[in-house]
Image (cartoon, grey):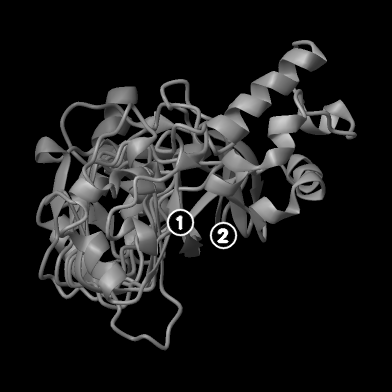
Amino acid sequence: MKTHFYILLMLGMVFLLGCEDEKLGTDLGVTNVVLPDISEESLGTEITIQGNGFIDCDVLALSPLSGGTEQPIYMETREVQSDHITVLYPSTATKDSYGLVLVRGSKMRTLGVINSTVGVMPDENLRNALSALFPDIFKGEKISSSAKYVTFTDGTLNISDKNITSLEGLEYFSNIRKLICNNNDISEIPAEVLSRLSELTAQNTGLTKLELATSEQPNTTLVSLNIDGSTKLESVDLYYCYNIEKFSALNCKLVYLDVRNYHSIYGGCLNYNSTDFKFTFSDDASKERLLKMESWWMDSYYSNSGSIVDAINNGVTVEGYDWMHDYPDGNNNYYYSYGKYQKTMKKYGEIPDINLRNALKALVPDVFDGDKVLTVAALNTEYFRNNRPLILAIRESLIWKDYNTSADTKTSFWMEIIWEKSILVNTQSVPATRQVR
Protein backbone atom coordinates (compact mmCIF):
# COMPACT_ATOMS: atom_id res chain seq x y z
CA MET A 1 0.00 0.00 0.00
CA LYS A 2 2.83 2.38 0.93
CA THR A 3 4.58 1.66 -2.39
CA HIS A 4 1.33 2.33 -4.24
CA PHE A 5 0.94 5.65 -2.39
CA TYR A 6 4.52 6.64 -3.14
CA ILE A 7 3.98 6.05 -6.88
CA LEU A 8 0.84 8.19 -6.81
CA LEU A 9 2.71 10.84 -4.86
CA MET A 10 5.52 10.98 -7.39
CA LEU A 11 3.06 11.22 -10.26
CA GLY A 12 1.38 14.06 -8.44
CA MET A 13 4.68 15.83 -8.04
CA VAL A 14 5.45 15.46 -11.73
CA PHE A 15 2.08 17.07 -12.40
CA LEU A 16 2.89 19.88 -9.94
CA LEU A 17 6.28 20.67 -11.42
CA GLY A 18 4.99 20.62 -14.96
CA CYS A 19 2.01 22.93 -14.45
CA GLU A 20 1.19 26.39 -13.13
CA ASP A 21 -0.86 26.57 -9.91
CA GLU A 22 -3.93 27.86 -11.69
CA LYS A 23 -3.89 24.77 -13.93
CA LEU A 24 -4.16 22.36 -10.99
CA GLY A 25 -7.89 22.76 -10.85
CA THR A 26 -9.93 22.40 -7.66
CA ASP A 27 -9.35 18.67 -7.04
CA LEU A 28 -10.92 17.42 -3.82
CA GLY A 29 -12.71 20.70 -3.36
CA VAL A 30 -9.73 22.47 -1.73
CA THR A 31 -9.21 26.02 -2.99
CA ASN A 32 -7.44 29.29 -2.12
CA VAL A 33 -4.45 27.48 -0.60
CA VAL A 34 -1.87 29.73 1.10
CA LEU A 35 1.42 28.10 2.07
CA PRO A 36 3.45 29.53 4.97
CA ASP A 37 7.13 30.40 4.89
CA ILE A 38 9.28 27.86 6.66
CA SER A 39 12.61 28.41 8.42
CA GLU A 40 14.95 26.30 10.50
CA GLU A 41 12.99 27.51 13.53
CA SER A 42 9.92 25.76 12.10
CA LEU A 43 11.43 22.31 12.49
CA GLY A 44 9.49 20.33 15.10
CA THR A 45 6.82 23.03 15.47
CA GLU A 46 3.25 23.46 14.29
CA ILE A 47 2.52 25.17 10.98
CA THR A 48 -0.83 26.09 9.45
CA ILE A 49 -1.88 25.87 5.81
CA GLN A 50 -4.75 28.20 4.95
CA GLY A 51 -7.41 27.34 2.36
CA ASN A 52 -11.02 26.31 1.88
CA GLY A 53 -12.52 22.84 1.76
CA PHE A 54 -10.41 20.82 4.22
CA ILE A 55 -12.14 17.90 5.98
CA ASP A 56 -11.31 15.77 9.04
CA CYS A 57 -9.71 12.87 7.21
CA ASP A 58 -7.19 15.01 5.29
CA VAL A 59 -3.49 14.19 5.71
CA LEU A 60 -0.51 16.22 4.46
CA ALA A 61 2.82 14.85 3.27
CA LEU A 62 6.11 16.36 2.09
CA SER A 63 7.80 15.07 -1.04
CA PRO A 64 11.44 15.95 -1.88
CA LEU A 65 11.69 17.77 -5.21
CA SER A 66 15.01 16.19 -6.10
CA GLY A 67 13.43 12.90 -7.18
CA GLY A 68 15.37 9.73 -6.48
CA THR A 69 14.20 7.13 -3.98
CA GLU A 70 13.57 9.33 -0.95
CA GLN A 71 10.36 8.45 0.82
CA PRO A 72 7.66 11.05 1.49
CA ILE A 73 7.49 12.55 4.97
CA TYR A 74 4.05 12.29 6.54
CA MET A 75 3.06 15.10 8.88
CA GLU A 76 1.08 14.62 12.07
CA THR A 77 -2.27 16.41 11.88
CA ARG A 78 -3.00 18.60 14.91
CA GLU A 79 -6.19 20.38 13.82
CA VAL A 80 -8.48 20.47 10.80
CA GLN A 81 -11.07 23.15 10.08
CA SER A 82 -12.66 23.88 6.73
CA ASP A 83 -10.47 26.96 6.27
CA HIS A 84 -7.14 25.57 7.53
CA ILE A 85 -5.18 22.54 8.55
CA THR A 86 -2.49 22.58 11.25
CA VAL A 87 0.28 19.98 11.22
CA LEU A 88 3.54 19.26 13.02
CA TYR A 89 6.39 20.15 10.68
CA PRO A 90 8.93 17.30 10.91
CA SER A 91 12.32 17.98 12.46
CA THR A 92 13.80 15.77 9.70
CA ALA A 93 12.50 18.02 6.88
CA THR A 94 15.73 19.99 6.44
CA LYS A 95 15.77 20.54 2.67
CA ASP A 96 15.15 23.97 1.14
CA SER A 97 12.02 22.90 -0.72
CA TYR A 98 9.37 20.18 -0.61
CA GLY A 99 6.25 19.45 -2.58
CA LEU A 100 3.19 19.60 -0.31
CA VAL A 101 0.64 16.88 -1.05
CA LEU A 102 -2.89 16.49 0.32
CA VAL A 103 -4.05 12.88 0.81
CA ARG A 104 -7.74 12.10 1.28
CA GLY A 105 -8.44 8.41 1.42
CA SER A 106 -7.21 6.96 -1.88
CA LYS A 107 -7.15 10.34 -3.56
CA MET A 108 -4.52 13.04 -3.52
CA ARG A 109 -3.65 16.41 -4.94
CA THR A 110 -0.60 18.64 -4.89
CA LEU A 111 -1.02 21.94 -3.04
CA GLY A 112 2.22 23.63 -4.08
CA VAL A 113 5.85 23.92 -3.06
CA ILE A 114 6.77 24.82 0.48
CA ASN A 115 10.11 26.62 0.86
CA SER A 116 12.46 27.00 3.81
CA THR A 117 13.94 30.50 3.84
CA VAL A 118 16.01 32.65 6.21
CA GLY A 119 15.36 36.17 4.94
CA VAL A 120 15.18 38.37 1.87
CA MET A 121 17.66 40.05 -0.44
CA PRO A 122 15.95 43.02 -2.11
CA ASP A 123 18.79 44.02 -4.45
CA GLU A 124 18.28 42.18 -7.74
CA ASN A 125 21.87 42.73 -8.90
CA LEU A 126 23.25 41.20 -5.71
CA ARG A 127 20.90 38.25 -6.10
CA ASN A 128 22.04 37.77 -9.68
CA ALA A 129 25.70 37.80 -8.62
CA LEU A 130 25.08 35.14 -5.98
CA SER A 131 22.74 33.12 -8.21
CA ALA A 132 25.59 32.79 -10.70
CA LEU A 133 27.48 30.96 -7.95
CA PHE A 134 24.53 29.13 -6.36
CA PRO A 135 21.68 28.76 -8.89
CA ASP A 136 19.03 27.41 -6.50
CA ILE A 137 19.70 29.64 -3.52
CA PHE A 138 16.81 32.09 -4.07
CA LYS A 139 13.04 31.83 -4.28
CA GLY A 140 12.29 35.24 -5.73
CA GLU A 141 13.70 37.69 -3.17
CA LYS A 142 13.70 35.04 -0.46
CA ILE A 143 16.95 33.36 0.55
CA SER A 144 16.92 29.59 1.01
CA SER A 145 17.97 28.24 4.39
CA SER A 146 20.98 26.48 2.89
CA ALA A 147 22.65 29.90 2.30
CA LYS A 148 24.33 29.62 5.69
CA TYR A 149 26.13 26.46 4.57
CA VAL A 150 27.41 27.47 1.12
CA THR A 151 31.17 28.07 0.85
CA PHE A 152 33.36 30.42 -1.17
CA THR A 153 36.80 29.81 -2.66
CA ASP A 154 39.31 31.05 -0.09
CA GLY A 155 36.31 32.52 1.73
CA THR A 156 36.24 35.33 -0.86
CA LEU A 157 33.18 36.96 -2.45
CA ASN A 158 33.95 39.47 -5.20
CA ILE A 159 30.90 41.47 -6.26
CA SER A 160 32.68 44.49 -7.74
CA ASP A 161 31.15 46.47 -10.62
CA LYS A 162 27.67 44.92 -10.31
CA ASN A 163 25.56 48.09 -9.87
CA ILE A 164 24.61 46.94 -6.38
CA THR A 165 22.97 49.47 -4.06
CA SER A 166 22.21 47.31 -1.00
CA LEU A 167 23.94 44.39 0.73
CA GLU A 168 20.87 43.54 2.81
CA GLY A 169 20.58 39.77 3.12
CA LEU A 170 24.29 39.11 2.70
CA GLU A 171 24.51 38.42 6.44
CA TYR A 172 22.78 35.07 5.86
CA PHE A 173 25.80 33.83 3.86
CA SER A 174 27.84 33.10 6.95
CA ASN A 175 31.01 31.73 5.31
CA ILE A 176 32.21 34.97 3.68
CA ARG A 177 35.61 35.94 5.12
CA LYS A 178 36.91 38.33 2.45
CA LEU A 179 34.53 40.77 0.76
CA ILE A 180 35.43 42.79 -2.33
CA CYS A 181 32.66 45.18 -3.33
CA ASN A 182 34.39 47.93 -5.31
CA ASN A 183 32.52 50.38 -7.55
CA ASN A 184 29.04 49.80 -6.15
CA ASP A 185 26.80 52.52 -4.73
CA ILE A 186 26.28 50.80 -1.38
CA SER A 187 25.77 53.02 1.67
CA GLU A 188 26.50 50.50 4.43
CA ILE A 189 27.60 46.95 5.12
CA PRO A 190 25.58 44.80 7.54
CA ALA A 191 27.25 44.66 10.95
CA GLU A 192 26.97 40.88 11.05
CA VAL A 193 28.93 40.65 7.79
CA LEU A 194 31.63 43.02 9.09
CA SER A 195 32.04 41.02 12.28
CA ARG A 196 33.11 37.91 10.30
CA LEU A 197 35.46 39.49 7.77
CA SER A 198 39.24 39.29 7.86
CA GLU A 199 39.53 41.53 4.78
CA LEU A 200 37.24 44.22 3.38
CA THR A 201 37.93 46.03 0.12
CA ALA A 202 35.28 48.66 -0.63
CA GLN A 203 36.87 51.13 -3.04
CA ASN A 204 34.81 53.84 -4.75
CA THR A 205 31.58 52.97 -2.97
CA GLY A 206 28.76 55.09 -1.59
CA LEU A 207 29.51 54.12 2.00
CA THR A 208 28.26 56.70 4.49
CA LYS A 209 28.94 54.74 7.67
CA LEU A 210 31.11 51.81 8.72
CA GLU A 211 30.20 50.34 12.10
CA LEU A 212 33.17 48.07 12.73
CA ALA A 213 33.24 47.56 16.48
CA THR A 214 32.21 48.86 19.90
CA SER A 215 33.57 48.42 23.41
CA GLU A 216 30.83 45.84 24.02
CA GLN A 217 31.53 44.05 20.72
CA PRO A 218 35.18 44.54 19.70
CA ASN A 219 36.28 43.28 16.29
CA THR A 220 38.95 40.59 16.55
CA THR A 221 38.77 39.29 12.96
CA LEU A 222 39.40 42.25 10.64
CA VAL A 223 43.04 42.41 9.48
CA SER A 224 42.86 44.51 6.31
CA LEU A 225 40.56 47.42 5.39
CA ASN A 226 40.65 49.37 2.11
CA ILE A 227 38.05 52.08 1.44
CA ASP A 228 39.99 54.15 -1.12
CA GLY A 229 37.81 56.60 -3.04
CA SER A 230 34.72 56.17 -0.84
CA THR A 231 34.26 59.92 -0.57
CA LYS A 232 30.91 59.91 1.24
CA LEU A 233 32.39 58.19 4.30
CA GLU A 234 33.51 60.85 6.77
CA SER A 235 34.10 58.89 9.98
CA VAL A 236 36.13 55.73 10.66
CA ASP A 237 36.67 54.41 14.20
CA LEU A 238 39.19 51.58 14.47
CA TYR A 239 39.75 51.86 18.21
CA TYR A 240 38.13 48.51 18.99
CA CYS A 241 39.51 46.70 15.93
CA TYR A 242 42.15 44.75 17.79
CA ASN A 243 43.89 42.89 14.96
CA ILE A 244 43.94 45.28 12.02
CA GLU A 245 47.29 45.45 10.21
CA LYS A 246 46.51 47.31 6.98
CA PHE A 247 44.33 50.37 6.52
CA SER A 248 43.90 52.48 3.40
CA ALA A 249 41.52 55.40 2.91
CA LEU A 250 43.20 57.35 0.13
CA ASN A 251 41.19 59.86 -1.91
CA CYS A 252 38.62 60.03 0.86
CA LYS A 253 37.19 63.05 2.67
CA LEU A 254 37.51 61.99 6.29
CA VAL A 255 36.68 64.36 9.12
CA TYR A 256 37.19 61.84 11.96
CA LEU A 257 39.62 58.96 12.30
CA ASP A 258 40.56 57.03 15.46
CA VAL A 259 43.49 54.63 15.08
CA ARG A 260 44.81 54.55 18.65
CA ASN A 261 44.83 50.80 19.08
CA TYR A 262 47.47 50.00 16.50
CA HIS A 263 50.40 50.02 18.89
CA SER A 264 48.85 49.03 22.20
CA ILE A 265 47.96 45.55 21.02
CA TYR A 266 50.42 42.69 20.81
CA GLY A 267 53.33 45.11 21.19
CA GLY A 268 52.56 47.09 18.03
CA CYS A 269 51.52 45.72 14.66
CA LEU A 270 51.45 48.64 12.25
CA ASN A 271 53.81 51.44 11.30
CA TYR A 272 51.78 54.63 11.06
CA ASN A 273 54.03 56.00 8.32
CA SER A 274 54.41 52.86 6.24
CA THR A 275 52.53 51.92 3.08
CA ASP A 276 50.27 49.77 5.27
CA PHE A 277 48.71 52.86 6.81
CA LYS A 278 47.45 55.67 4.58
CA PHE A 279 44.48 57.97 4.43
CA THR A 280 43.22 61.32 3.18
CA PHE A 281 41.30 63.88 5.21
CA SER A 282 38.82 66.37 3.80
CA ASP A 283 40.29 69.64 2.54
CA ASP A 284 37.25 71.51 3.85
CA ALA A 285 38.70 73.63 6.67
CA SER A 286 35.20 74.76 7.68
CA LYS A 287 34.60 71.25 9.07
CA GLU A 288 35.94 70.13 12.43
CA ARG A 289 38.51 67.49 11.48
CA LEU A 290 40.03 65.23 14.13
CA LEU A 291 42.63 62.44 14.10
CA LYS A 292 43.20 60.38 17.24
CA MET A 293 46.37 58.29 17.37
CA GLU A 294 49.12 57.10 19.68
CA SER A 295 51.68 59.84 19.44
CA TRP A 296 54.72 57.87 20.55
CA TRP A 297 55.21 56.67 16.96
CA MET A 298 55.45 60.25 15.71
CA ASP A 299 58.91 60.74 17.20
CA SER A 300 61.35 63.03 15.39
CA TYR A 301 62.85 60.30 13.25
CA TYR A 302 59.42 59.37 11.86
CA SER A 303 58.09 62.88 11.29
CA ASN A 304 59.14 63.72 7.74
CA SER A 305 56.35 62.19 5.68
CA GLY A 306 53.25 60.06 5.74
CA SER A 307 49.51 60.48 6.04
CA ILE A 308 49.66 61.84 9.59
CA VAL A 309 52.13 64.56 8.58
CA ASP A 310 49.94 65.40 5.59
CA ALA A 311 46.93 65.70 7.89
CA ILE A 312 48.81 68.01 10.28
CA ASN A 313 49.99 70.17 7.41
CA ASN A 314 46.39 70.30 6.17
CA GLY A 315 45.19 71.76 9.46
CA VAL A 316 43.65 68.60 10.91
CA THR A 317 43.55 68.55 14.72
CA VAL A 318 45.68 65.63 15.91
CA GLU A 319 45.32 64.22 19.42
CA GLY A 320 48.12 61.96 20.61
CA TYR A 321 47.35 59.37 23.28
CA ASP A 322 50.43 57.91 24.95
CA TRP A 323 51.45 55.15 27.29
CA MET A 324 55.26 54.77 27.49
CA HIS A 325 56.64 57.56 25.32
CA ASP A 326 57.18 60.03 28.18
CA TYR A 327 60.88 60.18 29.07
CA PRO A 328 62.16 61.73 32.38
CA ASP A 329 64.98 64.23 32.14
CA GLY A 330 67.86 64.63 34.59
CA ASN A 331 65.59 66.45 37.04
CA ASN A 332 63.01 63.68 36.97
CA ASN A 333 60.63 65.79 34.89
CA TYR A 334 58.76 64.12 32.07
CA TYR A 335 58.75 65.42 28.52
CA TYR A 336 58.04 64.29 24.97
CA SER A 337 60.69 63.69 22.39
CA TYR A 338 59.61 66.71 20.39
CA GLY A 339 60.08 66.21 16.69
CA LYS A 340 58.82 68.78 14.20
CA TYR A 341 55.30 67.38 14.15
CA GLN A 342 55.13 66.20 17.76
CA LYS A 343 54.88 69.87 18.72
CA THR A 344 51.59 70.26 16.84
CA MET A 345 49.87 67.45 18.75
CA LYS A 346 47.64 67.66 21.76
CA LYS A 347 48.85 64.92 24.13
CA TYR A 348 46.03 63.23 26.03
CA GLY A 349 45.19 60.27 28.20
CA GLU A 350 41.80 58.88 29.20
CA ILE A 351 40.22 57.76 32.48
CA PRO A 352 36.99 55.94 31.54
CA ASP A 353 35.70 55.50 35.13
CA ILE A 354 33.62 58.61 35.79
CA ASN A 355 33.94 58.36 39.60
CA LEU A 356 37.71 58.10 39.52
CA ARG A 357 37.90 60.85 36.91
CA ASN A 358 35.79 63.24 38.99
CA ALA A 359 37.82 62.51 42.12
CA LEU A 360 41.06 63.29 40.34
CA LYS A 361 39.60 66.43 38.76
CA ALA A 362 38.85 67.68 42.25
CA LEU A 363 42.46 67.08 43.32
CA VAL A 364 44.34 68.25 40.22
CA PRO A 365 41.96 70.19 37.92
CA ASP A 366 44.85 71.73 35.97
CA VAL A 367 45.86 68.41 34.41
CA PHE A 368 42.46 67.95 32.74
CA ASP A 369 41.14 69.29 29.46
CA GLY A 370 37.46 68.52 29.84
CA ASP A 371 37.39 64.79 30.60
CA LYS A 372 40.80 64.14 29.02
CA VAL A 373 44.07 63.98 30.91
CA LEU A 374 46.96 66.20 29.79
CA THR A 375 49.55 63.48 30.09
CA VAL A 376 52.74 65.48 30.56
CA ALA A 377 51.04 67.77 33.08
CA ALA A 378 49.73 64.72 34.93
CA LEU A 379 53.17 63.15 35.05
CA ASN A 380 54.76 66.35 36.36
CA THR A 381 52.10 67.53 38.79
CA GLU A 382 53.53 68.48 42.18
CA TYR A 383 50.48 67.12 43.99
CA PHE A 384 51.48 63.54 43.42
CA ARG A 385 55.12 64.20 44.06
CA ASN A 386 54.13 65.34 47.56
CA ASN A 387 51.13 63.13 48.27
CA ARG A 388 51.82 59.42 48.05
CA PRO A 389 49.94 57.21 48.30
CA LEU A 390 46.88 58.61 46.54
CA ILE A 391 43.88 58.75 48.87
CA LEU A 392 40.44 59.21 47.33
CA ALA A 393 37.38 59.83 49.48
CA ILE A 394 35.10 57.72 47.32
CA ARG A 395 33.37 54.44 48.02
CA GLU A 396 35.67 51.63 46.93
CA SER A 397 32.90 49.74 45.16
CA LEU A 398 32.66 52.51 42.59
CA ILE A 399 36.35 52.61 41.74
CA TRP A 400 37.94 49.35 42.70
CA LYS A 401 35.16 46.99 41.71
CA ASP A 402 36.20 43.38 41.04
CA TYR A 403 39.69 43.81 42.56
CA ASN A 404 40.49 41.70 45.62
CA THR A 405 43.60 43.37 47.02
CA SER A 406 44.18 45.63 50.00
CA ALA A 407 43.38 49.34 49.80
CA ASP A 408 47.06 50.34 49.84
CA THR A 409 47.90 47.90 47.05
CA LYS A 410 44.99 49.14 44.98
CA THR A 411 46.12 52.70 45.46
CA SER A 412 49.65 52.08 44.32
CA PHE A 413 48.42 49.93 41.42
CA TRP A 414 46.28 52.72 39.99
CA MET A 415 48.96 55.31 40.71
CA GLU A 416 51.30 53.39 38.44
CA ILE A 417 48.77 53.00 35.67
CA ILE A 418 47.59 56.61 35.69
CA TRP A 419 50.65 58.65 36.41
CA GLU A 420 53.46 56.54 35.02
CA LYS A 421 51.77 55.01 31.99
CA SER A 422 49.40 57.91 31.40
CA ILE A 423 46.20 56.07 30.47
CA LEU A 424 43.82 54.09 32.61
CA VAL A 425 41.73 51.40 30.96
CA ASN A 426 39.24 48.97 32.41
CA THR A 427 41.45 45.90 32.50
CA GLN A 428 38.44 43.69 33.24
CA SER A 429 37.11 44.20 29.70
CA VAL A 430 40.38 44.14 27.74
CA PRO A 431 41.56 40.89 26.06
CA ALA A 432 44.39 39.22 27.94
CA THR A 433 46.72 39.65 24.96
CA ARG A 434 46.26 43.42 24.94
CA GLN A 435 48.69 45.50 26.98
CA VAL A 436 47.35 47.62 29.79
CA ARG A 437 48.10 51.23 28.94
Is residue 134 shown to the viewer in this render? Answer: no
Q: Which residue is drawn at 11% across and 36% down?
A: 154
- The residue beneath circle 2 is 53
Tell me: residue 342, above or below residue 186: above
Q: What residue type is labelled 1?
A: Leu
> Where is residue 30 drawn, in percent x and y?
49, 60
Name the side, left or right, on which 385 lies relative to 31: right
> Where is residue 302 drawn, in percent x and y?
20, 49
- N-terminal label among 2 and 1: 1
Instruction: Out of 4 and 216, give the one closest to the viewer.
Output: 216
Instruction: Out of 22 and 107, give the one closest to the viewer.
Output: 22
- The residue beneath circle 1 is 28
> Where is residue 18 drawn, in percent x and y?
17, 58
Name the side, left or right, on which 101 lies relative to 334: left
Tell me: residue 59, above or below residue 214: above
Tell me: residue 373, above or below residue 426: below
Q: Are marks 2 and 1 in contact (CB under 8 Å)?
A: yes
